[in-house]
Image (cartoon, rainbow, N blue to C red):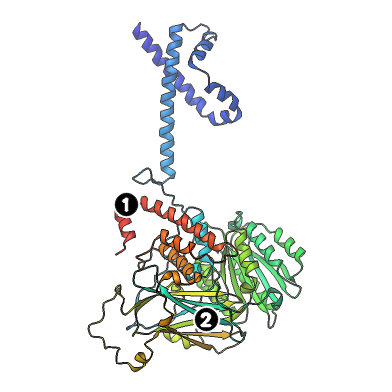
Amino acid sequence: MKDYQQAFKQRLLAVIISGMMVSGCAQESHDSVQPEQAQTDATTSAPELIAAKKDSPVNDYQLKPQQAEMMVSAQGQAHRLVKQRQQLSEAKEMANVMPMHSNIHHLVSAPITNDKFATLVQNGNMVVSETPVSTFSIDVDTGSYSTTRRLINQGQLPAKNSVRVEELINYFSYDYPAPIDADVPFNVTTELAPSPYNQDTQLLRIGIKGYDIAADQLGASNLVLLLDVSGSMSSNDKLPLLKQALLMLSQQLSAQDKVSIVVYAGASGVVLDGVAGNDFTTISRALNQLNAQGGTNGSQGIQLAYQLAQKHFIEGGTNRVILATDGDFNLGMTDHQQLVDYVAAHSKTGIGLSTLGFGLGNYNDHLLEQLSNKANGQYSYIDTLNEARKVLVDQFSATLLTIAHDVKIQIEFNPAVVSEYRLIGYENRLLNRSDFNNDAVDAGEIGAGHSVTALYELRYNDSQNKLADPLRYSASMATDTDVSINSDEVAFLKLRYKAIGGQASQLLTYPITKPQQLSHLHQASDDLRFAAAVAGFGQLLNHNNYVHDTDYAKLITLAESAMGQDRFGYRHEFVQLLKTAKVLSMQSAEAMPPSQVAKRVNPH
């Protein structure tokens, strides 16, 4: 009898498992069509099932109570076996699509994209007795901050050495005094305070403020909107956001302005040809009819855009092409250096190029930054409608009107006072010492109302935290008469710029003296302390080798102490970004092997 029961139970178990596996193939659709029935089945007790089976015909005969009990037992066992098989199958599928670390509690997302961010070589610590002069071009781009914000808000930290720290700093406005006389297009201020990054070091802030012009006082503008409508621009954060952004821009224009629209995908075409800036109906209709499709022949579109810019050129006005794209050029002139050279050549004819970046996934940050750099323009990344308003409405004058060309900074440090220095950021804006006086060397532009900030970390001669040992055979600088006379000078700042329409540069000079030095960081202005927090953030993201005495918690405290008026809330947003980055950094560290964590905390 026992053998019969065992054989019956095994056959019954096989039949039930087979039936469950077959019916399970359609389980998802069955559940979606009959949720109430599924809930009823799930809440039916085992005794109720037995009673129901007793009243139901099974193969033309009634189950005996003993057989019914065996059937329920077999059903339970079958459910467990099928569930185990489903869990095993799901685990295998998950393993195929998600990279697993040795510790299953730490799953770190590593999205694979085709985004292109250039890798920077960090500025080193320079010894003044060997290299006393530092020279670089200013930078008013802000794209690196917006892309960093976008990545962090998506739960991803930027790649090491991909963040341009100066663009993080210059994303924010600072309360620098504006120039009084328009003949000198900007005012320069300096400040010295202890550095938050390393012990026994100082932070030098150089602040430049351009004179501002009200929007209603701007001259006529000839704008050519060069818009990428290729298939890669179809997502909501690309072409749809682009349309809304340019509608905002068009509302700032007047009857004296000219607007043209060129689109490019597999081929290029003219949508608008020099309509009046205040013809909002025509401009909005043209923008609303755009759809994303096809390849990306950006070079052909650029050529057509410059033709229209030349056709409607306004003498004495602003003539600018505004390129809006995700930077995915895959047809036509795909050699990026050719594109850069092309726009650089046209900038010499008085037609500038500014770039607006959209979206991620196949985004080319490096190309858009380089195009604007070489074409007397500005690079911005638009990730939200608020960012579009900031760039195209709130900073309308600065975006369109350039007040000075080829702005260069050169600073000579006094070896009688300063032992070492390090420029924070501006890695791809460095110039040779002789380039400063060479007017043929291109440099950055500054727009109306723009502020530009540069930071140096200094080590004085009496610092106990110098990184370089003195040379055994170096000549003493103490006998140098000029140095001894200027012993109160920390450095001497020189600035060159070309006025609009001018070919020869103008020189401005500013001594930086030791009496400016503050004893404590908390005595410094809100602007210095906030800029220091932003620069520290960028250096942590880049895993900078020269930052040893700061972390996210310290930077959050520093930023929160320096919020200032913050009219638009950008500083408060930054603090939230810092807090999110701190959490992501902790998650990343937890997922690392211990040896890598130790190396990241102390790279030396």
Q: Amino acid at mark 2?
A: Val
Earlier residue among tags 2 and 1: 2
| Residue lying at 66% horizontally and 75% vertically, measured from the top left | 307
Question: How far across and down, in percent of the image, does residue 155 sit?
Answer: 48, 52
Residue 366 position (above or below residue 317) = above
Residue 225 sits in which quadrant? bottom right
**Tag 1's secondary structure?**
loop
As drawn, is 263 to the left or to the right of 326? right
Res 285 label: none
Name the residue carrying label 2. Answer: 188
- Identify residue for label 1: 593
Q: Confirm whether residue 116 shows in the render.
A: no
Q: Position of residue 164 (x, y in %)?
A: 47, 68
Identify the amino acid type marked 1.
Answer: Pro
Q: Position of residue 381 (x, y in %)?
A: 56, 64
Q: Gap in Å between the C-alphas at discs 2 and 1?
A: 47 Å
